[in-house]
């Protein structure tokens, strides 16, 4: 069942989305060489609790973290750990929090120090594909229009799209209908209606699309152990381009210019 949110519910969604956005703004300040992923998790958990929220993933079906930690070949659902981030790594931090009964969900993949050019391009393409997918998410269009936009954008540039994991509706539950795959055909799937809230989250691989789940039952990594990138926003459908409820603004204010340029590219010279 797909929910269309009321104006009051959307107001609560905005509050939850702002909370996760500010949370990753805090995490961004620590996403540096020498820091453990457990430290990032602690920063996120304390920030959410201090601001009246609840970390939605913590304890969810036994998940042990506030953040899902995605180092290099980890696609999604990695555990925070004593792993120390190193120059050249990438780390995705995926966070869900609820406040006043509604959830916000977002993810950002950080380059740690300077990363390889191949990895840098993967980050940039995945980041851009999120906004390409968002732009396709208009009232009256279908879920497959989002899926196809993301898939086409990434595959044209030589990357592959993970099949096993997808975006989703979001609201009073962390995961609601519809599923929002990052691959598919235009004009297929559920119709998008104003007031629907969805999390759009491309998970894009440098090598093949195949993934495996580790022995811990959660950590999803690429089979070929090549890197994977992941960016995510929570959006609300409108008759035009959607309203993006989460924002990367807090993160990007906190990142050094050189770090940001690895993700977004260098500003064009005049
Ligand atoms: N953002 C993740 C998702 O949409 C959140 C997973 S929380 C977990 O799948 F507990 F399942 F890890
Ligand atoms: Co999500």
Image (spheres, rainbow, N blue to C red):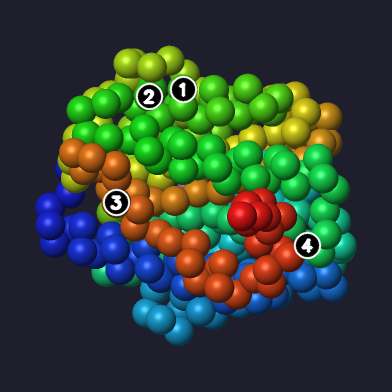
Distance between the alpha carbons at the discs numbered 3 and 4: 30 Å
Between disc 4 and disc 2, whose residue precedes?
Answer: 4
Query: For mark 3, what is the residue?
Result: 243
Instruction: Tell which of 77 and 266 is nearer to you.
Output: 266
Relative to 239, residue 191 above or below: above
Kindly tell me whether mark 3's CB lies below 8 Å from ligand 2.
no
Disc 1 element:
helix
Disc 4 element:
loop
Distance between the alpha carbons at the discs numbered 3 and 2: 17 Å
Q: Are marks 3 and 2 in contact (CB under 8 Å)?
A: no
Residue 180: x, y in percent? Answer: 42, 32
Query: For mark 4, what is the residue?
Result: 112
Disc 3 element:
strand
Query: For mark 2, what is the residue?
Result: 145
Disc 2 element:
helix
* Quarter that holds the C terminus: bottom right
């Amino acid at each position: 069942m797909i929910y269309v949110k009321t104006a009051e519910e959307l107001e609560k969604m905005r509050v939850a989305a702002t909370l996760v956005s500010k949370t990753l703004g805090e995490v961004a300040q620590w996403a540096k060489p020498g820091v453990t992923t457990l430290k990032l998790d602690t920063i996120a958990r304390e920030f959410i609790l201090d601001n009246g929220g609840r970390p939605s993933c913590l304890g969810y079906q036994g998940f042990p973290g506030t953040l899902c930690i995605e180092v290099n070949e980890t696609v999604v659902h990695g555990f925070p750990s004593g792993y120390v981030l190193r120059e050249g790594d990438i780390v995705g931090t995926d966070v869900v929090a609820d406040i006043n009964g509604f959830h916000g969900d977002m993810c950002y993949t950080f380059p740690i120090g300077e990363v390889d050019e191949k990895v840098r391009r993967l980050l940039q393409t995945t980041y851009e594909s999120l906004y390409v997918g968002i732009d396709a998410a208009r009232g009256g269009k279908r879920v497959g229009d989002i899926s196809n936009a993301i898939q086409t954008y990434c595959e044209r540039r030589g990357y592959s799209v993970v099949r096993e994991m997808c975006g989703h509706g979001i609201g009073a539950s962390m995961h609601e209908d519809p599923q929002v795959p990052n691959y598919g055909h235009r004009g297929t799937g559920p119709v998008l209606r104003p007031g629907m809230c969805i999390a759009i989250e491309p998970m894009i691989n440098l090598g093949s699309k195949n993934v495996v789940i580790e022995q811990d039952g959660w950590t999803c990594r690429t089979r070929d152990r090549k890197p994977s990138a992941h960016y995510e926003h929570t959006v609300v459908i409108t008759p035009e381009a959607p309203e993006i409820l989460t924002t990367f603004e807090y993160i990007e204010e906190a990142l050094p210019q050189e770090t940001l340029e690895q993700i977004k590219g260098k500003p064009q010279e005049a």
